[in-house]
Image (cartoon, grey):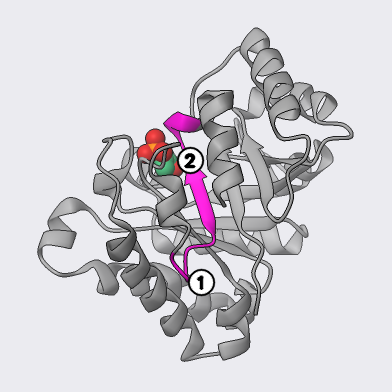
Amino acid sequence: MARIPLVMGNWKLNGSKAFCDSLISELKTALVDVKGCNVAIAPPVMYLAQAENLLTDSKIALGAQNVDVNVQGAFTGDISPVMLKEFGAKYIIIGHSERRTYHKESNEFIAKKFQLLKDAGLTPVLCIGETEAENEAGKTEEVCARQIDAVINTLGVEAFNNAVIAYEPIWAIGTGKSATPAQAQAVHAFIRQHIAKKSSTVAEQVIIQYGGSVNDANAAELFTQPDIDGALVGGASLKAAAFATIVKAA
Ligand code: PEP
């Protein structure tokens, strides 16, 4: 089955109104003819309204970097999936390792976010991946399976219909040390096989992005791998030319 890759930029805690204006206008020009690849950007939530306006009539979709586990009520500081949807966000990153680490988000908490996003008709981009120590101890598959099973066990494997998984080895994020195409492919194949144990149909269609120091020089080779369906891009998504090159390689 032909899967359409997704290349998504995660701006993290970067940007300003002026930066948002200039980066989005450069991206719109650079990606005006993009074909065969879905593209999204996830600016900080403060800039969603601005980005939504700027992206009118563009092929670039809007995303967000996080969502909270409540829809409405006395939850100071929280942002609900319904609010993200109202501002045009489609792809929502959950379970990023920075949130797992700095905000102590558990697999169960992340599964709850997954459920609320599905309920709202949004697309979860579930980040999974192992630390360097887990990698060296040969625990990569065990860690990834546990992170996926937290969703399957509560929502069923069908939850991964129209959802995205981003395999992001933590040791590769922001380090300039990407996984090799072969290393990434082996884990992506494992993830797909793991889901296929429950449903081969769901496994065949689920988009599995790679993330971790993807740049304009290494993207093309990563994308030759059969189970790598695009990328979640941090640092290189802040530069229009680099991000556009990655999109065109997908
Ligand atoms: C990320 O944080 O999702 C990421 C992949 O970052 P970078 O591309 O900078 O490694």
Does 146 appear above or below 87? below
The residue range painted magenta reads: 225-236
**Would you call the spot at circle 1 few (<14 residues within 10 Å), some (14-19), or many (20 or more)?**
many
| Residue type beneath disc 1 | Val
Does 172 appear above or below 133? above
Does 90 appear above or below 167? above
Query: x and y percent of residue 37 in the render?
Result: 67, 53
Residue sitting at x 67%, y 59%: 116
Q: Which is more toward the observer, 151 or 5?
A: 5
Residue 151 marker = 1
Q: Earlier in the sequence, mark 2 or mark 1?
A: 1
**Would you call the spot at circle 2 few (<14 residues within 10 Å), some (14-19), or many (20 or more)?**
many
Quarter residue 48 falls in: top right
**Quadrant in which ligand 1 is drawn:** top left
Please say if the residues under marks 2 and 1 sit with CB atoms less than 8 Å apart: no
Query: x and y percent of residue 149 in the render?
Result: 43, 76
Does 123 appear above or below 151? above
Query: x and y percent of residue 54 in the render?
Result: 81, 24
Residue 233 marker = 2
Residue 99 horizontal side relative to residue 17, left or right: left
Q: Residue furthest top?
A: 18
> Is 118 part of what is drawn in magenta?
no
From the viewer's perspective, is the residue at label 2 or at label 1 nearer? 2
Residue sitting at x 36%, y 67%: 185
Query: x and y percent of residue 25 in the render?
Result: 73, 20
